[in-house]
Amino acid sequence: MSDSSKSSSGIGFSGLLTVAFIVLKLCNVITWSWWWVLSPMCISWAVFLVILVVGLFIAHLSGPSF
């Protein structure tokens, strides 16, 4: 019996980087602003939005598919 449903369970690179930055900030190793500490989360959302906008733009250019 093969398992055809694969789920991706993990924190990912940006999540891991965010956790590392938060730990470093709370241990007073870095003195960055919280904006910089949490920026990997914002960057991953920005990449998602750019991919979404480009996909919608390409779908719009291809015209209606009736």
Image (cartoon, helix red, strand yellow):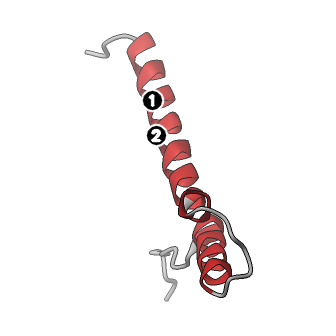
* Residue drawn where x is 56% and y is 44% of the image: 47
In the rendered image, the residue lying farthest to the left is 66
- Nearer-the-camera pick, 39 or 30: 30
- Residue 62, position as x, y percentages in the image: 44, 13
Dot 2: element: helix
Crowdedness near tag 1: few (<14), some (14–19) or many (≥20) residues, C-alpha within 10 Å: few
- Nearer-the-camera pick, 22 or 55: 22
Going by the numbered disc 1, the residue's amino acid type is: Val
Taking the image as drawn, is residue 23 in sight? Answer: yes
Check whether the beta carbons of the residues at disc 1 and disc 2 lie within 8 A of each other. Answer: yes
- Nearer-the-camera pick, 12 or 4: 12
50 sits to left or right of 17? left
Dot 1: element: helix
- Nearer-the-camera pick, 15 or 25: 25
33 sits to left or right of 31? left
Q: Quadrant of residue 25?
A: bottom right
* Residue drawn where x is 52% and y is 74% of the image: 8
- Residue 1, position as x, y percentages in the image: 49, 89
Residue at which label 2 appears: 49
Q: CA distance from mark 1 to mark 2?
A: 6 Å
Residue at which label 1 appears: 53
- Residue 60, position as x, y percentages in the image: 39, 16
Residue 37's tag is none
Residue 28, compared with residue 43, is above or below; it is below
Residue 37, compared with residue 25, is above or below; it is above
- Residue 61, position as x, y percentages in the image: 44, 11
